[in-house]
Image (spheres, rainbow, N blue to C red):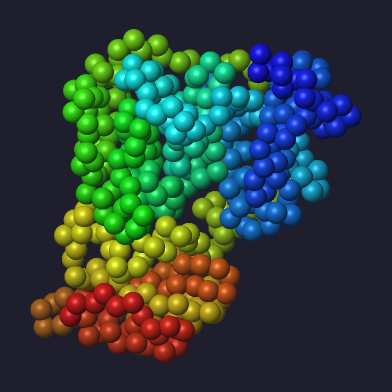
Amino acid sequence: MVRRQEEKKVEKGMRLGKYELGRTLGEGNFGKVKFAKDTVSGQSVAVKIIDKSRIADLNFSLQIKREIRTLKMLKHPHIVRLHEVLASKTKINMVMELVTGGELFDRIVSNGKLTETDGRKMFQQLIDGISYCHSKGVFHRDLKLENVLLDAKGHIKITDFGLSALPQHFRDDGLLHTTCGSPNYVAPEVLANRGYDGAASDIWSCGVILYVILTGCLPFDDRNLAVLYQKICKGDPPIPRWLSPGARTMIKRMLDPNPVTRITVVGIKASEWFKHEYVPSSPDDDDEEEVDTDDDAFSIQELGSEEGKGSDSPTIINAFQLIGMSSFLDLSGFFEQENVSERRIRFTSNSSAKDLLEKIETAVTEMGFSVQKKHAKLKVKQEERNQKGQVGLSVTAEVFEIKPSLNVVELRKSYGDSCLYRQLYERLLKDVGTSSPEQEIVS
């Protein structure tokens, strides 16, 4: 019935290739989503029309390009399908599966929590979809109720892969380091800004979703971000006693603040509570040939991202990282006892990243330090030994870009003499800094 009503609203004469465009289904910062009909097959679809002029900002360009690249890989009944991409000089048109049931968020807001039986079925579909993503090396990183849609039959469809990560985004330590996600759903290890496992952080977010589905409220919530993040890092949300023991155990194990002991997808699927009336979903990988989308067709420049960065390109930080770098919200104590030799200093500079790195290298070399350079990082060492036979000092200097005309320099001491460390940052602050440092040094 819904599809027939939509088809009646198609406006004749508005065409995009073989698609006849209809009414606007939604509108955002970068364009519109329109109902459309494939004039060859008769299939109803949604067309996400993105205005290139509105995504000139580098981060937004990357986000859209990443979503396209990721969705090309994913064909599963619980993931919104990308059929094809049509592009012109001014527009990017993403032809996607039409999902008519709205957001899971809206359903919870309107109708309240689900019964445990219905909630478990929805949760099973969510885990099936995320398990499939992880098997493809895709980690969503922004799972929340708003990014879970419902089709006409009430089945879930995971959407919005703009912040997703692929294997090439892992650093040498095998971890992801971009702090992203939505405040109420983000995992504590992501906030710690020390690297995290994409699969474990997705499981945490799924645990938050399960909690909301079964209780109708968020497990962690506060208007004050600092307080919210402290609650997240502590874990231990209030779990209603009226939930079954199996559901309570599942929530507790998914919202374990320690990612090492947090339950995995395998553990979730092995639990008796999850397996109750469970019907596994089968991927659609063999249903049709993969659409070959030419990334160059819409010419989104990809610079300063996790992929394809130049050797001197700084790490671009977002609001989460900027908040996490503030001393009033140092969350490291929630995870391990802080070693004073790893204290950090940060200050800002208006110099370009390239000039900044060159000035830092010149300054530390003149002070007698040896320098190893990698991307936007400098490893600075002075090999002199004191009476105890210890190496003089080892420091990592890294540049983070807030915007092209503003960078943050972060110094991290691995080990060594605190007095020499002070001399080093005072010299750098004098030569390249534009603001007083945020000091976290203990002599």
Q: Residue at x 46, y 67 (%)?
A: 400
Placement of the N terminus among the 4 image quadrants: top right
257 lies left or right of 62: left
Where on the picture, by quarter, is residue 262?
top left
Where on the picture, by quarter, is residue 413?
bottom left
Q: Is residue 377 above or below residue 420?
A: above
Q: Residue at x 27, y 42 (%)?
A: 259
Judging depth in this view, the residue of 71 and 35 nearest the camera is 35
Which percent across, then down, holds residue 352? 56, 76
Which percent across, then down, holds residue 84? 70, 30
Which percent across, then down, holds residue 357? 49, 75
33 lies left or right of 405: right
Q: Residue at x 25, y 71 (%)?
A: 343
Where on the picture, by quarter, is residue 53?
bottom right
Judging depth in this view, the residue of 235 and 102 nearest the camera is 102
Q: Is residue 389 above or below residue 214?
A: below
Placement of the C terminus among the 4 image quadrants: bottom left
